[in-house]
Amino acid sequence: MASKLTQSNRAGWLFALPGFGLMVVFIILPFFFAISLSFTNQRLISPNPTEWVGLANYRQLLGMGMITLDAVTDESGQIVRDDTGAPTYPRLREYTRNNPDYPHLDGMKQWFSFGRGGEARTFVLARDLVFLTAVKNTVVFVLVVAPVQGGLALVLALLINQKLRGINIYRTIYFMPVVVSIVVVSLLWRFIYDGNNGLLNNILDFLSFGYFEPVNWLGNPKTAFGSIIGMSIWQAVGFHMVIWLSGLQTISPTLYEAAEIEGSSKWQTFRYVTWPGLRNTAILVLIVITMQAFGLFAQIDVMTNGGPLDSTQTIVFQAVERGYGKQDISGGSAISVLLFLIVLSISLFQRWLTRERT
Amino acid sequence: MKFLKLSAGAMALTAGLSGHAWAQTALTMWYHGAGNEVESQIINQIVSDFNASQSDWSVTLESFPQGAYNDSVVAGALAGSLPDILDVDGPVMPNWAWSGYMQPLQIDESVIANFLPGPKGYWDGKLYSIGLWDAAVALVTRQSYLDELGLRTPTLDQPWNAEEFQAALDAAKNSGKFDYALDLGTAWTGEWYPYAFSPFLQSFGGDIVDRSTYLTAEGALNGEAAMTFGHWWQDLFANGYAPATQDGADRDTGFANGKYAFSWNGNWAALGALSTFDDTVFLPAPDLGNGPKIGAASWQFGVSASSEHPDGASAFIQFALQDKYLADFSNGIGLIPATAAAAAMTENYKDGGPMAMFFGLTEAQALVRPVTPGYVVEAKVFEKALADIANGANVEDTLDAAVDEINADIERNGGYGH
């Protein structure tokens, strides 16, 4: 195999060179750059020399700590409770800021806390809360988008895989959002989600005969990320629909005819003829959606900038924000490397899950 | 054959042209105002006036859209292809100077002695950039609102104090006439936050960073004054005086539509407000305890470090500092001219002009944003902290986290040369 690639194939390599060269310069080289920069303190612009800092960037991103605190008691030993009856705890600030007894917690913030029976409570602290929030949001995004977008795309593909007059019009309509730039789509959805007189609020108001209270979809931490998930699914569903469609059309019609003669129901036909025939397509769609979902950036950049209250922070947005906005190329590189490791391990895991069992 | 003739003709033509230009040394200049026709016209006029006025230098201008300008300069610097003359946003200048993109101007101090303080860009004790104009922010409202609500009209000498400002907000809110008492412009994300809102913090006695050393934000951004500011800021939104998340359209037209009683807005929007209501008044910033403050410094001109002809570049900048050009920019796009003499030549800023208030404001209240290369990062951290607090985040934790991030950044940069 190696000999076939290298020998008497000069023309082939020559033809591949332009594309291959561009890939090396713009994808492969930056990839290795990012790995090595993530171990330095490289800045976007700075007169200071670049220094090797080892794992400091990763420690900063992933550093975590834990502290268990007893509830506050008054002089008589009674636990001080707040208005809801829950015990109160000392301010974490006392421990995480300039406290010589807790140097390992310096500069950390509360991520979440849990009680372990009794009135003591354990607080989990993170050195970089925004990054961990971004990781959590991105994982939620992938977990919701991958199955919902993939499933919806399959339903659409089944619907338009029929010989009807004008079916191409529907195919075009479903595919249209994919062709439009994501930045344009995001801008339009910003108007749709507008809190005052956005299209969505108007429709809901009309449908509920005016009982619906207008929601500021992107301005409310509770609804912002859900809104972005919704529009993201809608935007790219057409692309995956086309992939499913191509998979559907490779299934031989004779199989369907045979199934019909055998008297199989619609569901049985789908379960035993269509679905097995879509196996490889399903793997492709799943992996592509997962990888695209991890790269969530443009929607955030245009619609929310990570806010409100970090509810829409994502990994790639943080990488850009730090590397470029805050001129910290090394920190941004470290985030990219972590993202690469996450996506790589998930892809390998998916490959293993969907492997051919013999 | 025809092609040959054409190219021969073209060659002759270029030879003729460059023969003329040989006498003058070519200088290049980048400007951020692409897309604004009036602005382009004025800057082009200055360039051609300069080229015609002397025979040593010939400036050619290249304009960029503002949104892409800073990126272009950073990219140009990394690629080693910066022009001789740059324009730079005032608070960003120390970052570029420290990074070695810019060199000090060769302009005598006496030339700019009459200039407002905001347009003068000093870093490390040297003048690196100089602006033809400044910008200012005021509390925009209508005289009829003040009368209806029974409020004293504050003046530069006697601005509202914290209680009076609070009473004004309460009166506007309780009147029930407005959606919100105050329009702060939270829709304008980005530099607007530190530019427009850090003066409130400074008026409370805090700051983004400790200006005595520029090496820490501890105590400045999370000290007692800053915490008071943080709670005040949060209460503005929690108690319904101002909207925490605002629609861009509301920012532009809300005051004109009567949604807001007071609008915290810049001189660039003043002409619009004046033409909407003839009783529009511009009130000075309130004194929240440590004196009334507004932001200063806008776009300024400087010379790139890689320029081989800094004398020529400085000559051009000095040429552009003439009062008539300051007045042109002011009349054309509403900016505040950098000298009193130029202000007297403008329609809006001359004594008794409709926007003369802004010139007084800049003179009396303006405070430049922290003069440090770290400002670029500090501004982003500050913006996020304010947005989070407005949306209900814990004030102490948020300001502490902001301090930690700013301090870590200063440390990573070896103190930014301070």
Image (spheres, coloured by chain):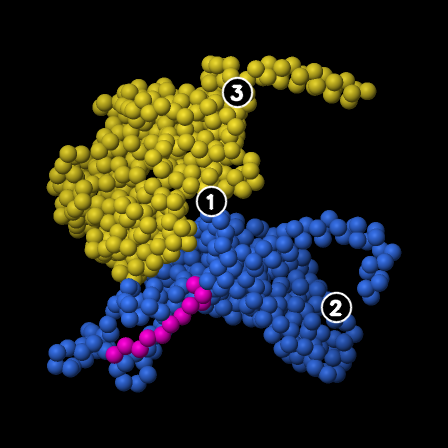
Chain colours: A blue, B yellow
Q: Pointer 3 and pointer 2: residues touching (CB < 8 Å)?
A: no
Tell if the residue under mark 1 belongs to the same chain as the one under mark 2.
yes
Quadrant in the picture for the N terminus of chain B: top right
Q: Pointer 1 and pointer 3: residues touching (CB < 8 Å)?
A: no
Q: Is residue B178 left or right of residue A301?
A: left
Magenta residue span: A59-70
Q: Pointer 1 and pointer 2: residues touching (CB < 8 Å)?
A: no
Q: Which residue is mark 1?
A: A47
Q: Nearer the viewer, mark 1 or mark 2?
A: 1
**Chain designation of label 1:** A
Q: Which residue is mark 3?
A: B58
**Chain designation of label 2:** A
Q: Secondary structure at mark 3?
A: strand
The 10 Å Cα crowd at callout 3, few under 14, some 14 to 19, many 20 or more, is: many
Q: Position of residue B248 (x, y in %)?
A: 38, 46
Q: Is residue B48 left or right of residue B143?
A: right
**Chain designation of label 3:** B
Image point 77% across, 79% down: which residue?
A: A258
**As drawn, A62 above or below B164:** below
Residue B373 in the magenta stretch? The answer is no
In this orientation, which residue lies closer to the viewer: A199 or B269?
Answer: B269
Quadrant in the picture for the C terminus of chain B: top left
Image point 28% across, 71% down: which residue?
A: A101
Residue B228 sits in quarter: bottom left
Q: Which residue is mark 2?
A: A250
